[in-house]
Image: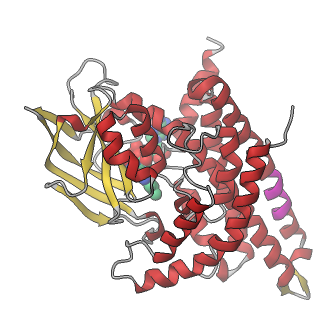
């Protein structure tokens, strides 16, 4: 077994690490200062545009897309260590490289299932980083971890679909640059096959009847850097039938296809967050003295740091194995591993971040360190893209099936 990265990955890692040091970390404070001056906190700070231009110039662009026609053409195994590096600054670096959720999943959907017109109108500006997008599935009124529960209606009326429903936690939608929504709803609510009732349609932001109603909070704060998580109402929104993505009844299958790569990207970035937490823990531990000795000399602190290192090494191996399996046997073949990393990674990284917060005392929960925001981001990933329990249930079922 060869644990080394190949030459292309090493080259991109080298470039990306330098880009992070030179441009991304210094931009973190600048972005916050600029945001405070903006007319709306949901607008994009100017420094983000500068980062994007520089990343693109350096060829650090669309690295997530395995399709070489549209993206960098990297395998999951090649992309994994790069996504990890961007996770060290998850509110800036993925956007700078045009590798941020939910655009990544949406671009994958359009590249895989969109027709030529849809690609031209929406995929091209997304690939160029000119617009942002949102994916609207979850609804406040129903348990949306079970996609068959979705109630939003997509009714055919002549050459149009009429969409009616209410969604929430639609990431990115507060950002005015978010110009297109991929909406999941039911075209055949009475259909016999509950997994063929759903379809996906493209809804441009300015379509009459679409209202971005409010920003949902995350642990009491508004997640400006991700373009927020909006409640969105669709009140008899009309779009041409040509806005259907794929085929009628294909929504459930597209959602499944979309979430595989998305989950591994989140896990890769989470490992980067954990690495940043370990670095901050160590720096703090050597520079702060309590009761006559540096915190670094306290056994309990050493245990936290050691346990964090062990956990990160384990997680990284599992994530890389999953990436390799997705490349070699496909997303379906890597089902168990994708679920395993989706369960293990947020849980473990939340724990590491919690220790890092503790070690920083009050500073840990403050805005002066990135830890509190990283903790909240990691914690939400125990819900987003499907709650842990749903993955545990399906993984356990597959495991048990071998014995019945
Ligand atoms: C920060 C953030 C960003 C998000 N971004 C988006 C987005 O961009 N687009 C979008 O459409 N959605 C988004 N979501 C929504 C997210 O995908 C859903 O919250 C998630 O799928 C769970 O659905 P739900 O909230 O309806 O919870 P429910 O389905 O009501 O589930 C609640 C709880 O019930 C338990 N549960 C459910 N099923 C099982 C089971 N089979 N076995 C055991 N326990 C179970 C779990 O503990 C679960 O957490 C986001 C959420 C957050 C927090």
341 lies left or right of 314: left
Visible in this render: residue 274?
no
Position of residue 167 relative to residue 161, above or below, is: below
Q: Residue furthest front?
A: 57
Q: Where does residue 65 sit, x and y in percent of width and height?
A: 55, 42
In the picture, residue 194 is in which quadrant?
top left
Residue found 89% across the figure and 82% down from its top? 294
326 lies left or right of 115: right
- Quick one: 290 or 66, which is closer to the camera? 66
Position of residue 350 relative to residue 345, above or below, is: below
185 lies left or right of 228: left
Is 152 in the magenta?
A: no
Q: Where does residue 86 sit, x and y in percent of width and height?
A: 64, 59
Q: Main secondary structure of the magenta part?
A: helix
Q: Residue furthest top?
A: 404
In the picture, residue 96 is in which quadrant?
bottom right
- The quarter of the rendered structure image containing the C terminus is top right
């Amino acid at each position: 077994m060869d644990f080394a990265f190949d030459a292309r990955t090493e080259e991109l890692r080298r470039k990306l690490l330098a880009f992070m040091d030179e441009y991304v970390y210094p931009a973190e404070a600048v972005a916050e200062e600029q945001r405070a001056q903006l007319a709306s906190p949901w607008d994009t700070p100017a420094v983000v545009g500068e980062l994007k231009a520089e990343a693109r110039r350096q060829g650090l662009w669309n690295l997530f897309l395995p399709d070489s026609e549209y993206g960098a053409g990297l395998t999951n195994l090649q992309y994994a260590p790069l996504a990890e590096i961007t996770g060290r600054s998850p509110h800036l670096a993925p956007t700078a490289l045009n590798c941020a959720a939910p655009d990544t999943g949406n671009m994958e959907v359009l590249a895989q299932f969109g027709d030529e017109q849809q690609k031209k109108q929406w995929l091209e500006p997304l690939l160029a980083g000119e617009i942002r997008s949102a994916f609207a599935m979850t609804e406040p009124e129903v348990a949306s971890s079970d996609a068959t529960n979705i109630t939003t209606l997509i009714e055919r009326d002549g050459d149009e679909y009429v969409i009616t429903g209410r969604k929430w936690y639609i990431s990115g939608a507060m950002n005015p640059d978010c110009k297109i929504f991929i909406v999941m709803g039911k075209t055949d609510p009475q259909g016999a096959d509950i997994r063929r009732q759903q379809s996906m349609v493209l809804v441009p932001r300015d379509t009459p009847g679409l209202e971005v109603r409010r920003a949902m909070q995350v642990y009491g704060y508004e997640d400006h850097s991700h373009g927020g998580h909006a409640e969105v109402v669709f009140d008899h929104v009309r779009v041409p039938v040509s806005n259907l993505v794929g085929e009628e009844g294909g929504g459930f299958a597209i959602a499944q296809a979309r979430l595989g790569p998305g989950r591994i990207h989140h896990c890769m970035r989470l490992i980067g967050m954990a690495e940043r937490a370990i670095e901050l823990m160590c720096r703090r531990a050597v520079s702060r003295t309590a009761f006559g000795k540096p915190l670094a000399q306290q056994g309990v602190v050493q245990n936290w740091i050691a346990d964090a290192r062990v956990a990160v090494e384990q997680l990284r191996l599992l994530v890389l194995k999953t990436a390799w399996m997705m490349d070699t046997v496909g997303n379906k073949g890597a089902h168990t591993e994708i679920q395993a990393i989706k369960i293990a990674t947020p849980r473990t990284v939340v724990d590491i971040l919690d220790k890092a917060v503790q070690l920083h005392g009050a500073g840990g929960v403050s805005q002066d360190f990135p830890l509190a925001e990283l903790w909240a981001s990691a914690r939400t990933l125990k819900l987003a893209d499907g709650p842990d329990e749903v993955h545990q249930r399906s993984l356990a079922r597959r495991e048990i099936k071998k014995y019945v």
